[in-house]
Amino acid sequence: MTNPCIICVAITGSLPTKANNPAVPITVSEQIESTQEAFEAGAAIVHAHVRNDDQTPSSDPDKFAALKEGVEKHCPGMIIQFSTGGRSGAGMARGGMLPLRPDMASLSVGSNNFPTRVYENPPDLVDWLASEMLAHDVKPEIEAFDLSHILKAREMADTGQLAGTPYVQFVMGVKNAMPADRDVFDYYVHTVQRLFGADAPWCAAGIGAAQATLNDWAIAAGGHARTGLEDNVRLDRDRLAPSNAALVRRTVAICETYERPVATWAQARAILGLRQPNI
């Protein structure tokens, strides 16, 4: 293949702590340093959450602003994607950082089960988050935990709630949600191509041990890949990942196996139709 593969690094998330892996970056300064290492290793997108000093999830716009400023300084051109996920806040607090105009933000368009709770994304909140992204020129990444979420993205695009071609990410391997099932994965790819066109970009993320598996499936199938300590803190069963960059390098190696070049930040912006940065 010759089409470049975009690598997204999910640096922190809402759940992993330093007790799980000391390499998980918690403070903004740690996150900036970890992102820079991952950027230099080949990541074109950083998917970002922020944390409080006690490592609990936060939705503080000031923390997001400081992280954005640091990434823009140390990783010029890198695509900054903020999380609007439900573990970091409730209601409209989940989108309180969108006026900062990151390049992208995650958008879950439906609810599903998580390991110990329901991940609630009620329609009125989804509609509001989508409207905020439109207002601030933030491209959503549709986090699809279920087939219905891909179909919902098509509906939202048809009604003008999403601008341009949606960028859909399949999330597989969450306990009590969609497992890493190859037949389902293949049907997800088929559905995106049927609804949005054969050339529509898409991505896949695997949770825990499924991370390397989904990286392999996505890269081999012509999609894009997400890695990082948010989703998986290990290199393998016996070794913790020493950094986000180490997981990015593993993904780069998979790209080399399938003879796919790793997308630069400029190529990734062109593929996703994003505005050019002021650098």
Image (spheres, helix red, strand yellow):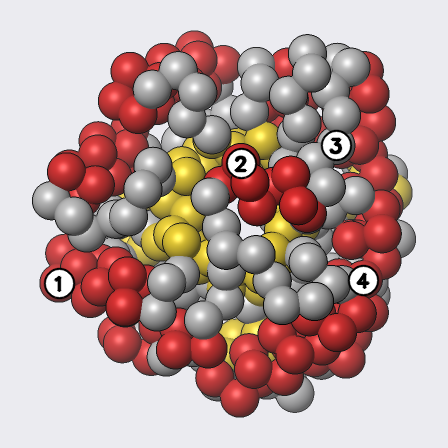
Task: Please identify, in this view, whether the residue under mark 2 or under mark 1 is nearer the observer.
Answer: 2
Question: What numbered label is drawn on residue 36?
Answer: 4
Give me the C-alpha separation between circle 2 and circle 3: 13 Å
Q: Which residue is mark 1?
A: 124
Give me the C-alpha separation between circle 3 and circle 4: 16 Å
Mark 3 packing: few (<14 Cα in 10 Å), some, or many (20+)? many
Q: Which residue is mark 2?
A: 271
Residue appearing at x 49%, y 50% in the figure: 274
Front one among 23 and 39: 39
Locate residue 277: give its quadrant: bottom right
Mark 1 is on which residue type? Asp
Residue 239, can we see it?
yes
Disc nearer the start of the sequence (2/3): 3
Query: Along the horizontal axis of the image, is 211 left or right of 192?
Result: right
Mark 3 is on which residue type? Val
What x and y, as percent, mark residue 163? Answer: 28, 48
Element at label 1:
helix
Task: Please identify, in this view, whether the residue under mark 2 or under mark 3 is nearer the observer.
Answer: 2
Element at label 2:
helix
Q: How many marks?
A: 4
Q: Which residue is mark 3?
A: 262
Mark 2 is on which residue type? Ile
Mark 4 is on which residue type? Gln
Question: What numbered label is drawn on residue 63?
Answer: none
Front one among 115 and 199: 199
Give me the C-alpha separation between circle 1 and circle 3: 38 Å
